[in-house]
Image: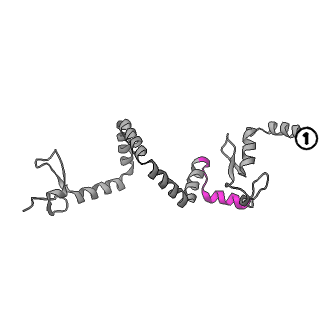
């Protein structure tokens, strides 16, 4: 006959293997069965996510070196599988990834980006090249001081403005320079 124990939560008699071990109890087993313990933990996380976040953060700070070493070892062992997974994930989730990048870098949603595309008739705001003629999507042009979005540009126009550090005087001097060369 298998040894059993009574769960104080669900009030059922269960096998010993259905309980977690616990050094703080006389019999060496938790009062609640594994199912009840898991359910309570799940409910606790749902009711108090901030507490879980802080607990996880404290654990990470305390165990940072050990976690980092484990992650490096894991990535070294599983490099090929992780790279393949990342490639498949990226192919399946291009829109989701793009949405995250737009939100993180420029604070706009993918819907806002698409509204700008429509407003600009799917063209670069400067040279008017159609997005269908490009290998990449249009870049979000923004004021680096204020963060305000000015429009969408092809990579060449965006790099051109960036090269002149968004300085109108530099652009005017460059324009005069080009006119002198005609």
109 relative to 178 in the view: left or right: left
Residue 26: x and y in percent read 10, 47
Where disc 1 sits, the SS reads helix
> Which residue carries the number 1 mark?
179
Magenta span of residues: 105-119
Tell whether 172 sits left or right of 145: right
Please give the name of the residue rendered at 61% of the width and 57% of the height, measured from the top-left corner.
110
Q: Quadrant of the N terminus?
A: bottom left
Q: Position of residue 29 (x, y in %)?
A: 15, 51
Kindly tell me whether residue 175 is visible in this rendering: yes
Q: Quadrant of residue 167?
A: top right
Q: Main secondary structure of the magenta part?
A: helix
- Picture residue at 60% right of the left edge, 52% below the top: 102
Question: How many callouts does the rendering have?
Answer: 1
The image quarter in which residue 2 lies: bottom left
* Front residue (pair 13, 92): 92
* Relative vertical location of residue 7 with respect to residue 28 in this rendering, above or below: below
Return the x and y of residue 132 as percentages of the image width and height.
72, 61
Q: Is residue 15 magenta?
A: no
32 left or right of 93? left
Front residue of 130 and 125: 130
Q: Quadrant of the C terminus?
A: top right
> Quadrant of residue 68 in the image?
top left
Q: Residue furthest left?
A: 1
Q: Is residue 120 above or below residue 166?
A: below
Q: Residue at x 49, y 51 (%)?
A: 83
């Amino acid at each position: 006959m298998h040894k059993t124990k009574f769960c104080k939560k669900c009030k059922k008699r269960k096998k010993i293997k259905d309980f977690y071990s616990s050094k703080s109890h006389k019999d060496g087993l938790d009062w609640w069965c594994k199912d009840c313990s898991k359910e309570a933990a799940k409910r606790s996380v749902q009711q108090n996510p901030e507490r879980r976040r802080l607990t996880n953060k404290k654990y990470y700070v305390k165990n940072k070196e050990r976690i980092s070493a484990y992650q490096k070892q894991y990535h070294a062992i599983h490099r090929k599988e992780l790279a393949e997974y990342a490639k498949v994930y990226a192919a399946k989730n291009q829109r989701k990834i793009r949405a995250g990048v737009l939100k993180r870098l420029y604070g706009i949603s993918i819907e806002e980006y698409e509204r700008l595309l429509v407003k600009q008739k799917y063209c670069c705001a400067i040279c008017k090249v159609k997005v269908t003629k490009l290998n990449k999507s249009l870049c979000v042009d923004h004021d680096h001081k204020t963060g305000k979005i000015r429009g969408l540009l092809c990579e060449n126009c965006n790099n051109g403005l960036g090269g002149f550090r968004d300085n109108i005087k530099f652009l005017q001097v460059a324009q005069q320079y080009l006119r002198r060369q005609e």
